[in-house]
Amino acid sequence: MNVNLDRHDVISVDGGKTLLSARTFTVSEVAKVLGEKYVESRQGWFNEEGIECHVLQQFKGWTKGRARITVEFIPDKEDSPLDDLRKKVNEVN
């Protein structure tokens, strides 16, 4: 399951793959840099409210709503609630 990160969440990346000068930074720091570099008027795009817009989706037509830019985290391995039970069963066998 992918996770949309909160503006206060911290990201740490391998050297050379960062958008900032640091290897560790918050989501709000990424949004600020992207907003300054790539969006003339970033107000709305990176906050909780987003901006008012219409979206055209295939087979659904136009839908009025809001859009915002978020940072999404994709875990390498998703933990299952059954992992602990499996571990205990394997230890017994």
Image: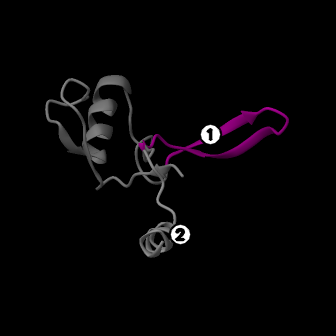
Q: Nearer the viewer, residue 14 or 71?
A: 14
Q: Residues within 10 Å of mark 1 (few under 14, many from 20)?
A: few
- Label 2 sits on residue: 82
Query: Image point 29% across, 38% down: which residue?
Result: 30
Magenta highlight on residue 6: no
**Display coloring:** one colour
Q: Residue furthest left?
A: 22
Q: Secondary structure at mark 2?
A: loop
Instruction: Report x, y in % for residue 23.
Output: 17, 36
Asked if marks 2 and 1 touch (Cβ < 8 Å), the reply is no
Q: Is residue 68 left or right of residue 10?
A: right
| Amino acid type indicated by mark 2 | Leu
State which tag comes first along the sequence, 2 or 1.
1
Depth check, mark 2 against mark 1: the one in front is 2
The quarter of the displayed image where residue 29 is located: top left
- The prevailing secondary structure element of the residues shown in magenta is strand
Q: Is residue 23 left or right of residue 7?
A: left
Residue 53 got which mark? 1
Query: Image point 74% across, 43% down: which residue?
Result: 63
Query: Image point 49% across, 53% down: which residue?
Result: 49
Question: Which stretch did the figure color magenta?
Answer: 50-72
Query: Image point 32% across, 31% down: which residue?
Result: 34
Instruction: Report x, y in % for residue 90.
Output: 47, 68
Q: Secondary structure at mark 1?
A: strand
